[in-house]
Image (spheres, helix red, strand yellow):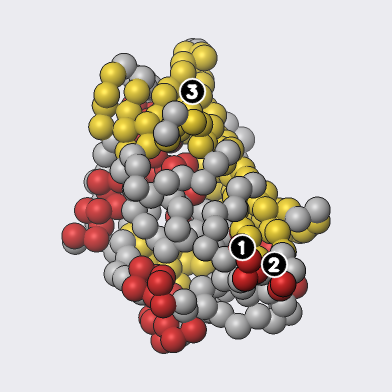
Amino acid sequence: MHIVHELLSLLELEKLEVNIYRGQNRDLGTGRVFGGQVFAQALVAARRTVDDAREAHSVHGYFLRPGDLKAPIVYFVDRPRDGGTFTSRRVTAIQHGEAIFHLSASFHVVEPGLDHQVPMPDVPDPDSLKPELEQIREKAHRLPPEVRHVLTQDRPIDFRSSESHVGGAPGLHEPERFVWFRVIDQLPDDVITHQAILAYASDYGFLPTALLPHNVAYGDPRLFVASLDHTLWMHRPFRADEWLLYVMDSPSAAGARGFVRGQVFRRDGTLVASVAQEGLLRMRERSSVGRSEGRSESK
């Protein structure tokens, strides 16, 4: 499908020189580059420099500046180590001559070893849930007119949960949520495509989990939200075009920062990945919202 091709094209980085790649952007309605996109593209850039048959198992990213949707992103890859079973890479994402993102990734050969996992929680099956896009379209009248078209456009990934984090009414809830997701068309078999799409999707709706106990809705004009860092550990094989369950919770919010963590399961209950993120949750006084409206705010 065309919309899936657009997602895959984000991951088809242009090689500019040895260890240097360039990627394009897709607007998700936030006014800046989606953090999951930069995370995924940096992972692809790192993997392009790994020659052996080893795949990412640990990926850590730091968001330094908001990304400019109108400018491509250039990725510089550093090669600190090529060991017997592990390979390490560092990636810096550049726009307008400044670093906007740093990534560290470790790649590992397939090895047998000890094996255990926590059980998958009992949640409604994805076939029993309404796609999030349908939920958002039903609430489109609540969305700001300037982002309504972007947030209701067709998507390459089908997200399904009991309630969307977009356009929802505030309330007091436990800081827990779950989302099923999968790409809506069949993907190529190469591992990096599936890992990169998981990296991309793992940032979507993750940090808003920390808002659930505070009667603050995502999109509240008093609220400034920004990812500070994001970590993904991949434990077992998976496909991003088959249903994956993303279980999220937020054990803490303090000091204008929220912490969230997640687990990703295959539909058969296999734990395939773990995720963690800290993000900025800065509340402004109502009197200052009007004065700062329309301005970009830095971290």
Packing grade of label 1 (10 A; few <14, some 14-19, many >=20) is few
Question: In the image, what residue type sits under mark 2?
Answer: Ser
Q: Residue furthest left?
A: 2
Q: In the rendered structure, are the residues bearing label 1 and label 2 in contact, judged by CB atoms less than 8 Å apart?
A: yes
Q: Residue at x 41, y 70 (%)?
A: 147
Q: Which residue type carries mark 1? A: Ser
Q: Which mark is residue 89?
A: 3
Residue 83, position as x, y percentages in the image: 50, 13
Which residue lies at the image location 37% right of the left edge and 57% below the top edge?
27
Of badges 1 and 3, the one in the foreground is 1
Disc 2 from disc 3: Cα separation: 43 Å
Is the Cβ of the residue at disc 2 closer than 8 Å to that at disc 3? Answer: no
| Residue carrying label 1 | 292
Picture mark count: 3
**Residue at the farthest right position:** 254
As helix, strand or loop, the secondary structure at mark 2 comes to helix
Question: In this picture, is 243 found above or below 191?
Answer: below
Mark 1 → mark 2, Cα distance in angstroms: 6 Å
Residue ID at (26%, 26%): 15
Q: Secondary structure at mark 1?
A: helix
The answer to which of 99 and 262 lies nearer the viewer is 99
Q: Is residue 30 above or below residue 88?
A: below
Marks 2 and 3, the one that precedes in the sequence: 3
Q: Percent position (x, y) of residue 79?
A: 46, 16
**Residue assigned mark 2:** 288
Structural crowding at the residue carrying mark 2, measured as other residues with C-alpha within 10 Å and reported as few (<14), some (14–19) or many (≥20):
few
Q: In the image, residue 253 lies at what x, y percent? A: 77, 58
Residue 158's disc number: none
Q: Quadrant of residue 171?
A: bottom right
